[in-house]
Amino acid sequence: MSLAFLLIAFLTVATAAVAMALRNLIRSALLLVASWAGIAAFYLWAGAEFVAFAQVLVYVGAISMVVLFAVLLTRPSRDEAEVTPASAGRLLPALITGGAVLGVLVGAIVGSPLRTTAKPPPPVTVREIGLQLMGPHAAALVVVGALLTVALLGAVVIAATSRPADPGEPR
Amino acid sequence: MSAPAANPLPLLERLPVALRDACTNWLPESWRWLANSLLSIVAVFVVFATLFALLTLAERKILGRVQNRPGPNRAPLPFLGLRTYGLAQPLADGIKMLTKEDIVPRGADRVLHFLAPVALLAFSIMTFAVIPYGRTLLPVELDAAVLYFFAAGAATELAIFMAGWASRNKYSLLAAMRALAQLISYELPLLLSVVAVVLEAGSLSTSVIVEKQGAWLFGILPQWHVFTPWGFAGFLIFFVAALAESNRSPFDLPEAESELIAGHLTEYSGFKYALFFMAEYFGMCALSGMGVTLFLGGWQAPFPALGFIPSYCWFAAKLLALLFVFMWIRATFPRLRIDQLTRLAWKFLVPLALVNLFTAAFWVLSAGWAGPLAFARWVVAGALVIGPFLALGRRLSAGLGPRSYRYA
């Protein structure tokens, strides 16, 4: 446990916690992005360069935009970006759901055999990752790609409103 | 920045690294890397901040020249009173920006309003870290440098959104959404054109990509990527997308004064506005530097006989030439409409970039062809570039002939 790791972990958890505590949705979303960046910093600390940059590119660059657009487009006016606190009656289901998720995650972490060898792993180059993804794991990659494409097309179909083209419209 | 121990390079070539080593050699071994990194950061920042100051002047001078007017020529040098072609204009601008009142709207989100320009500038400076400025001048040697560059660049979108939302101004928010739509649309052709280079070089490291372009055809012609069919098309796609990514004319409509009263910058004044301005120029410089690295051979000399000129001079020359084209385009082309902008990205550039990826793949696969087959390789690759361009261009511009304006 180095100081850098503790600092990164603290920042990641703290931003996530503040994001949940805030009432302003936009600020929460931006703090969530900071939390994702913290996870990327953790990957970088662990030596996984490629995963770290991919995390920044995908989460900080793209997913954050989806979240922010979703918040902006689903709130009629910006004054409603503030969320009123939910009633105390919803506290119990929230705790149960959160506890269940936590239990599953902790169970998975504790249950997985972690080898604690002193020998450091060999450095992995981006080239090797690429060859692994294109060779043994090509099928998984293609399946994930197809899944995401289908999801994207579905979103477009749902969002698109067919409107007859206006002949007077400038092109 | 790593210099081999036995250095066969000429003096001028290793001068920057030698200077740095002379500054840090007295430090203990464990501290030297820190001092070296800090010196690199300071050097990059000083060079590009100076370049920014001179670019603002150069841009106004070039625009003035194109529009047949002198441009800024009044600001005298301090204490001397010499009006050296407005050379002191950046200084005057800087003092003006520093002393102007910093206005924050009453309803604004003060924290985010302050953070937006800071974040934008920070992320644009981060992109400078992986550009090889010379044979020995690479601030950070990363295995996934290209990925790092675009990851840092992607974070700037967030800053623009913060600026638009925190200003609590309808023009700001609308313009921020438009800017995001533009940035996201053009990121796709930008990245796709870069993937072709990565495919050819077989590496994401910028230094390897530059070194792969160092060979000579017939001993005199440079083997830069731009001199291949796919590289030429890729460079043009990259350049158009870079224009849009850096909010430059003719894609500067997020900041269009006439429609959006300067867009997400509406509620910014004083030094915060200057920071946005600086970030825009830094983004332009970084993307140009990346374009030079990926397509124009980086720090390589154009002819073997000119190899005696230090590599960083060649990089600087190519960078400045590319920046000049940015300004030239600004002076020449009118601004696009938002629908034309997105149509250009999604219907024209993205398909062409995808086809270009296939062309690059063909080029890599046919690398071993020799004799008449090498000629066939050029013909096929050229047809793969020109054919889709013509077909797509004709289809998209069908029915859009020259208009006649009767009451103009």
Image: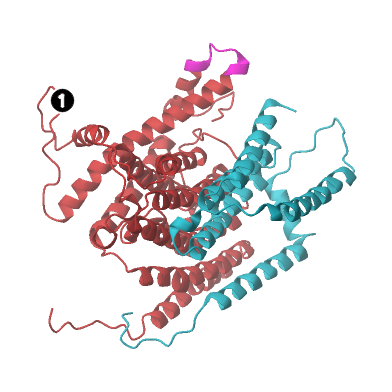
Chain colours: A cyan, B red
Residue at the location (53% across, 59% down)?
A71
Quarter of the picture containing the N terminus of chain B is top right
Magenta region, residue range:
B23-31
Quarter location, residue A132: bottom right
| Mark 1 burial class by Cα count in 10 Å: few <14, some 14-19, many 20+ | few
Q: Is residue B43 magenta?
A: no
Q: Position of residue B363 (x, y in %)?
A: 58, 64
B390 versus B323 height, above or below: below
Q: Position of residue A121 (x, y in %)?
A: 80, 37
From the viewer's perspective, tell me whether residue B214 is left or right of residue A101.
left
A44 versus A148 height, above or below: above
Residue at the location (57% across, 77% down)?
A158
Do we see residue A149 in this rendering?
A: yes
Residue at the location (46% across, 36% down)?
B134
Q: Position of residue B253 (x, y in %)?
A: 32, 61
Q: How many marks?
A: 1
From the viewer's perspective, tell me whether residue B406 is left or right of residue A127.
left
Do we see residue B209 in this rendering?
A: no
Quarter of the picture containing the C terminus of chain B is bottom left
* Amino acid residing under circle 1: Pro
| Closer to the camera in the image, A51 or A112 | A112
| Residue under label 1 | B78
From the viewer's perspective, tell me whether residue A102 is left or right of residue B73.
right
Quarter location, residue B286: top left
| Closer to the camera in the image, B163 or A60 | B163
| Closer to the camera in the image, B405 or B259 | B259
Quarter location, residue B396: bottom left
| Closer to the camera in the image, B355 or B300 | B355
Q: Position of residue B311 (x, y in %)?
A: 43, 37
Q: Secondary structure at mark 1?
A: loop
